[in-house]
Amino acid sequence: MSAIELRQVAKGFGATPVLTDVDLAVPDGSMTAVLGASGSGKTTLLRLIAGFEHVDAGTVVIGGQLVDDGCRAIRPQHRGVGYVPQEGALFPHLTVSGNIGFGVPRREQHTVAQLVDLVGLHGLEQRFPHQLSGGQQQRVALARALAIHPKVVLLDEPFSSLDASLRDSVRRDVTRILAETNTTTILVTHDQDEALALADQIAVLRDGNVVAAGDPRTLYRDPPDITAATFIGEANILTAHVQGDQARCALGTVVLHTNGSQTNGAAALPGPSRLLLRPEQLVLHLQARANTVSATVVDSQYHGHDTLVRVALDDPHCHLLLARVSGDLALTPEQPVWVEVRGSGRAWPIRME
C-alpha cells in the first residue's frame, strides 16, 4: 500500500513551470529520498504534499485520502503531515519540551516526555534552542514533527547544515527513530551518498519530472539512462560497440549484465553504444597482467577508507576514468598503472540524428 501517491502533478509559478506530470508512489512505512540538483523542484514537491502550496493539475493522495486535486485542497493542519525544514525552525523562546509540545492538545502533553526519550534528549527538556548543538536541534525538530502522530514526515535537507562527523551520527539516529515508529518518510536531498545510504526508494527529479524511481541498489547498478547514471554516484561513460551480451571498448571486452531474462535495456541492440562502469569496477595494478590496459595516474583524492583515482588510458580517444581503490594504495601523478575491469556493465545505444 502507498502512503503517498502523486499522479500527474504539475506546479508552476507565474510563467515558469517547476513540476510537470510528476508520478510518485511512496510505500507505507518506507523512506523515499527525492534526489535532484538545485532548482529541480524538490522543495516545491514537499510543499505540495504538506499543503503549503496547491497543485495546478494532478492529484495528491495521503493515506488513501485525496488532499489536493487542483480544485479543492485540504488544509495543512488536517493532512497529518509532519514537516522538518532544513534549519529545524525551532521557536527560540521555547524550551525543548515547549517546542516538542507546541500544538499538542493539553490532554496529550504526557507524550512529550516519551518523545524526549525517543530522540535521546532526556535531561535537556528545559534547555532553549541556543543551548543545543545542531544535532540536538534537529532531534527536537523531528520530535515536534512526530508529536502530532503524522501519517508521513517530510524532511527537507535536514542534515545539510551539520558538519560531516555530526551529520553521519544524526542521520543514523533520525532514520532509526523513523524506522522504530514505522513512519512513512520523504527525504529531500542533493547528496547522492545520503540517498543511497538511507532510503528504501530513490526518486530522481530532473527538469520537473521524476525520471527514475526504485530501490537504491537497482538504480545504482541499472539506471534508466546516462543522465541518471551520472547523477546517482560517480560514473565512467565509455564509447563501445555492442554485439550480443558483450561490449568492446578501450578497456577490452565487457560483459553486459541482464535485467531479468533480457539483456539490460537497449544494450541488446548491436552497434555503437555508451557503456557505464562504476569506479569500483576498475581495478588498478602496479604491473601488467592478463586482460589489463596500461594507463597513467593523473591525480587522486584520499578519503581514508578509499581513494578516488583519475587515470588516463594510453588511448587518445578515451577520456579520463575514475577508479576507486583501497586507501592503503598510495599512487602518485604520472605513475604507470594497469587497469582491469571486474563485473558487468550497462550500455545504451548511440542514437544517430
Image: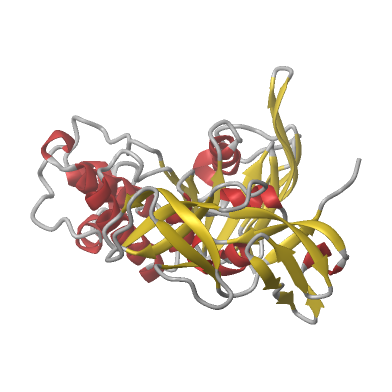
Quarter of the image holding residue 345?
bottom right
Q: Answer with left or right where residue 214 lies relative to residue 244.
A: left
The quarter of the rendered structure image containing the C terminus is: top right
Residue at 48%, 65% in the rendered image: 338
Residue lying furthest top: 14
Identify whether 53 is placed above or below 331.
above
Please provide percent x and percent y for residue 152: 50, 55
Q: Answer with left or right where residue 129 lies relative to residue 191.
A: left
Residue at 79%, 74% in the rendered image: 263
Q: Answer with left or right where residue 90 lies relative to residue 225.
A: left
Identify whether 34 is placed above or below 325.
above
Identify whether 21 is placed above or below 213.
above
Residue 150 shows up from this direction: no
Q: Answer with left or right where residue 70 lies relative to residue 229.
A: right
Please provide percent x and percent y for residue 103: 35, 42
The quarter of the rendered structure image containing the N terminus is: bottom right
Please provide percent x and percent y for residue 258: 73, 76
Identify whether 182 is placed above or below 63.
below
Please provide percent x and percent y for residue 47: 55, 37
Q: Nearer the viewer, residue 310 or 343?
A: 310
Residue lying furthest bottom: 261
Residue at 81%, 66% in the rendered image: 242
Residue 134 shows up from this direction: yes
Q: Nearer the viewer, residue 325 or 144?
A: 325
